Protein backbone atom coordinates (compact mmCIF):
# COMPACT_ATOMS: atom_id res chain seq x y z
CA UNK A 1 0.00 0.00 0.00
CA UNK A 2 1.39 3.35 -1.00
CA UNK A 3 1.75 6.29 1.34
CA UNK A 4 -1.04 8.19 -0.46
CA UNK A 5 -3.39 5.21 -0.25
CA UNK A 6 -2.71 4.88 3.47
CA UNK A 7 -3.42 8.57 4.02
CA UNK A 8 -6.72 8.24 2.13
CA UNK A 9 -7.64 5.19 4.20
CA UNK A 10 -6.97 7.10 7.43
CA UNK A 11 -9.09 10.02 6.20
CA UNK A 12 -11.96 7.65 5.47
CA UNK A 13 -11.61 6.06 8.92
CA UNK A 14 -11.75 9.48 10.58
CA UNK A 15 -14.90 10.37 8.62
CA UNK A 16 -16.54 7.06 9.55
CA UNK A 17 -15.74 7.60 13.23
CA UNK A 18 -17.10 11.15 13.10
CA UNK A 19 -20.34 9.92 11.53
CA UNK A 20 -20.69 7.23 14.20
CA UNK A 21 -20.25 9.86 16.91
CA UNK A 22 -22.94 12.00 15.26
CA UNK A 23 -25.34 9.05 15.10
CA UNK A 24 -24.61 8.21 18.72
CA UNK A 25 -25.31 11.78 19.82
CA UNK A 26 -28.57 11.76 17.88
CA UNK A 27 -29.66 8.45 19.41
CA UNK A 28 -28.91 9.84 22.86
CA UNK A 29 -30.95 12.93 22.04
CA UNK A 30 -28.00 15.29 22.44
CA UNK A 31 -28.81 17.60 19.55
CA UNK A 32 -26.27 20.23 20.58
CA UNK A 33 -23.43 17.72 20.48
CA UNK A 34 -24.69 16.26 17.20
CA UNK A 35 -24.79 19.73 15.66
CA UNK A 36 -21.29 20.52 16.93
CA UNK A 37 -19.95 17.24 15.53
CA UNK A 38 -21.62 17.83 12.15
CA UNK A 39 -20.13 21.31 11.91
CA UNK A 40 -16.72 19.91 12.83
CA UNK A 41 -17.03 17.19 10.18
CA UNK A 42 -18.04 19.73 7.53
CA UNK A 43 -15.16 21.99 8.51
CA UNK A 44 -12.71 19.10 8.28
CA UNK A 45 -14.04 18.03 4.86
CA UNK A 46 -13.90 21.59 3.51
CA UNK A 47 -10.34 22.05 4.74
CA UNK A 48 -9.31 18.75 3.20
CA UNK A 49 -10.93 19.66 -0.12
CA UNK A 50 -9.07 22.97 -0.08
CA UNK A 51 -5.76 21.25 0.68
CA UNK A 52 -6.38 18.71 -2.10
CA UNK A 53 -7.11 21.55 -4.53
CA UNK A 54 -3.91 23.37 -3.58
CA UNK A 55 -1.91 20.16 -3.94
CA UNK A 56 -3.35 19.42 -7.38
CA UNK A 57 -2.60 22.98 -8.52
CA UNK A 58 0.99 22.60 -7.32
CA UNK A 59 1.34 19.34 -9.22
CA UNK A 60 -0.07 20.94 -12.38
CA UNK A 61 2.35 23.86 -12.00
CA UNK A 62 5.28 21.44 -11.83
CA UNK A 63 4.25 19.72 -15.08
Image (cartoon, rainbow, N blue to C red):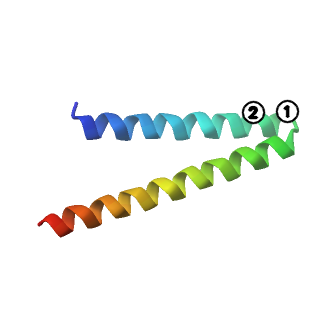
The answer to the question of whether label 1 and label 2 lie on touching residues, with beta carbons closer than 8 A, is: yes
- Residue 33 at x, y = what percent? 80, 41
Label placed on residue 56: none
| 13 to the left or right of 42 | left
Relative to 31, say whether 55 is above or below. below
Relative to 47, say whether 63 is above or below. below
Per the image, the residue denoted by label 2 is 24
Q: Residue at x 71, y 44 (%)?
A: 37
Q: Quadrant of the C terminus?
A: bottom left
| 20 to the left or right of 51 | right
- Residue 31 at x, y = what percent? 85, 45
Which quadrant of the structure image shows residue 57? bottom left
What secondary structure is found at the residue carrying circle 1?
Answer: loop
Q: Quadrant of the N terminus?
A: top left
Relative to 21, say whether 32 is above or below. below
**Looking at this rendering, what residue extends furthest in the left direction?**
63
What secondary structure is found at the residue carrying circle 2?
Answer: helix
Per the image, the residue denoted by label 1 is 28
| 59 to the left or right of 14 | left
- Residue 26 at x, y = what percent? 80, 40
- Residue 28 at x, y = what percent? 85, 33
Q: Residue at x 79, y 36 (%)?
A: 25
Amino acid sequence: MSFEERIQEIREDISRLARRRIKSALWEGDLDLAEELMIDLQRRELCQAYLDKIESEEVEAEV
